[in-house]
Amino acid sequence: MPDWKALALARGLKLSGKELDALVQPLEALDAVFRPLLEELPPELDPAPVFSPGEQPE
Amino acid sequence: MTIQEAGEALRSRSVSAVELARAALSRVARLDSSLRAFITVTGDYALERARLADRELAAGRNRGPLHGIPAALKDLFAMRGVRTTAGSPVFDKFVPESDSAVTEKLEAAGAVILGKLNLHELAYGITSANPHFGAVRNPWNLERSPGGSSGGSGAAVAAGIVYAAMGSDTGGSIRIPAAFCGVVGLKPTYGRVSRFGVLPLGFSLDHMGPLARSVRDAATVLNAIAGRDARDDSSARHPVVDFVPEEGCSIRGVRIGFPANFFFERIDPDVESSVRGAVARSQSLGAVVKPVRVPDIAALNAIGQVILLSEAAAVHAGHMENRALFGEDVLRLLDQGRLVAAADYVNAQRVRRRMAREFDALWREVDCLVSPTTPLVAPRTGDLTVRLGGSDEGVRMAATRLVRGINVLGLPALSMPCGLSAEGLPIGLQIIGPAFAEAAILRVGAALEDGGVGIPPCPLV
């Protein structure tokens, strides 16, 4: 899991301890669900950079 | 009165467009100091357009079902010469020189635009407690949130001010206020309605759609705004059909998927009971209700959050120097987005593609899927948590839990009222369909509405 607090400080965000906690806690919760989804991604799976639900746009 | 009924009255000359516009403006004057649904009221312009609509009808020119109908736009849609704020001081002096595609199409269809509607700041949140333009209030109970981000749109329709209002939906922002305010909200398929001229929040998640008083009214607006627009790179070439279900339409034999997992976990018992009641009604109308297991919606929600955090941070990267311009919750989300790694954004888009394929398989089994729109009814304004299923959950996460994943898939979804809670607050039923199957889900919604699924008018009306 990324060290969100370190990332925030490296980004130059000037936040109090309380603000930093409020920033980081939702990211930790999100990461706990998101990170495992990446474990078995096949290398050949492309991203959907221009998303299309059923057809390719022009 | 619905759009159809008002249209008939207009065409039979029993009412004029000017009278409809004046009635709507008079409701704004009477109610909006309480509701705070509008940021800008374009009264003089609306009356001018209404006079034109009357002159045209008198001359035998009928632009269609929206001719002379009062409507309004979420203040995210550009309207030429009218300040368009996105609910933020960042844009409080922004006066567009051209219309959004939706504004153009609504006006070409004869709609009379009454003004620009309040919203959650930058459309980035679900309460519409806007710190800069005032907290929008729910017409069913002024102490309650109207939902968001299209909260002004939901409130203006529920309060009977306009017949339809435009909203945008990036993670539930049309369907949540529709559910909380007891109106119909339609998020069309991604690409069905042009995003041109609408301030983006999440490029690949933003959908434009109507909030209205009935399912057929929402379909009527979709008829006017759908279609290919070369100015929007994601605009689809899919054929546009007549989306308005015929009177007395049947859903006999329609396969309605009833989720056996996720959608009925940790929900308000009143919500569950009303939604199950609507499903039972669909069965009595001849639909075939099939229990189905849906792919991992929690995973969809997570990748939706990663994508939105990243895309919104990209959209607003240029405005972050002046942090005082943002409300606390929006600033926090934008800061969070700046911390998400590029690789995580790309991988979220890869998981998205895989999950869209998984979801495609569902449409071989059923024609649509039904669920609650939200697991809760409108919370009190200012409440940050809600107790559901014996545990506390953040209001924002709870309100988006059943809707956000559908944005990730880009699928069409309708929210329609299906009951009232014990406290007298509206409950929303969500009907989700395959890509570009708006006509099918609107048909199910209209048949249910015809079959008695719905709620009484808001007491404020």
Image: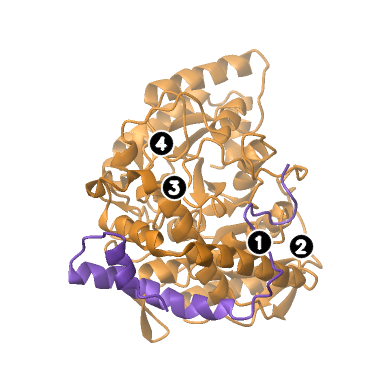
The answer to whether mark 2 and mark 1 are in CB contact below 8 A is yes
First of labels 3, 2 by sequence position: 2
Q: Are marks 2 and 1 on the same chain?
A: yes
Q: Earlier in the sequence, mark 2 or mark 1?
A: 2
Which of the two discs, 1 and 4, labels the residue nearer the N terminus? 4
Residue farthest toward the front in the current orientation of the protein: A10
Q: CA distance from mark 4 to mark 2?
A: 37 Å
Front disc: 1 or 4: 4
- Give percent across and percent down for residue B124: 40, 54
For the residues labelled 1 and 3, say whether their Cβ atoms are less than 8 Å apart.
Answer: no
Mark 1 nearby-residue class (10 Å; few <14, some 14–19, many ≥20): many
| Residue type of the residue flagged with mark 1 | Leu
Q: Which residue is mark 4?
A: B116
Residue highlighted by disc 1: B448
What's the colour of chain A in the image?
Answer: purple
Instruction: Tell which chain the image draws in orange.
Output: B
Q: Does residue A36 lie above or below B244 as drawn?
A: below
Q: Position of residue B35 (x, y in %)?
A: 31, 47
**Chain to which mark 1 belongs:** B
Name the residue that disc number 3 marks: B315
* Disc with the residue nearer the chain's start (4 vs 3): 4
Q: Residue at x 64, y 33 (%)?
A: B65
Same chain check for tags 4 and 2: yes
The numbered mark at residue B251 is: 2
